[in-house]
Image: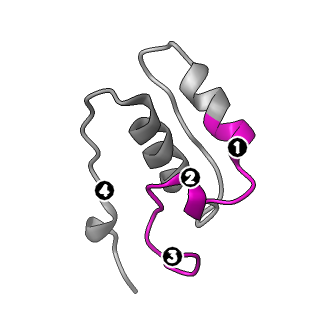
Amino acid sequence: MIFDITPKQDRKDFFDREEEIEKLKELKTPIILVLGLRRTGKSSLIRISLNELNLPYIYIDLRMFEERN
């Protein structure tokens, strides 16, 4: 779904980030930081890359613990 605010899990719902997905999938380091401004697709980028790698992983979303004003 295009206008869903939750992080995407499938590449067909995530537009114009093919290069970033491929770069992330090629990395072979034990720790990777994905940094950027809020709501720019960092979580979607991570989830799509992990799904395409078909490796076991644990994804913990801590947004429910954010302080809301």
Q: Nearer the viewer, residue 25 or 34?
A: 25
35 or 7: nearer the eye?
7
Name the residue located 43 percent from the left edge and 47 percent from the top edge.
47
Distance from label 4 to label 3 (Cα)? 20 Å
Quickly name the residue at label 1: 18
Is disc 4 placed on a helix, strand or loop?
Answer: loop
> Alpha-carbon distance for marks 3 and 2?
11 Å
First in sequence: mark 3 or mark 2? 3
Would residue 39 be counted in the magenta stretch? no
Magenta span: 1-21
Q: Earlier in the sequence, mark 4 or mark 2?
A: 2
Q: Which residue is mark 4?
A: 61
Does label 4 or label 3 sit earlier along the sequence? Answer: 3
User: Looking at the figure, which quarter contains the C terminus?
Assistant: bottom left
Q: Which residue is mark 3?
A: 1
- Seen at 58% across and 58% down, the residue is 12
Q: Which mark is residue 11?
A: 2
Task: Say whether disc 3 or disc 1 marks the residue closer to the N-terminus.
Answer: 3
Q: Residues within 10 Å of mark 1 (few under 14, many from 20)?
A: few
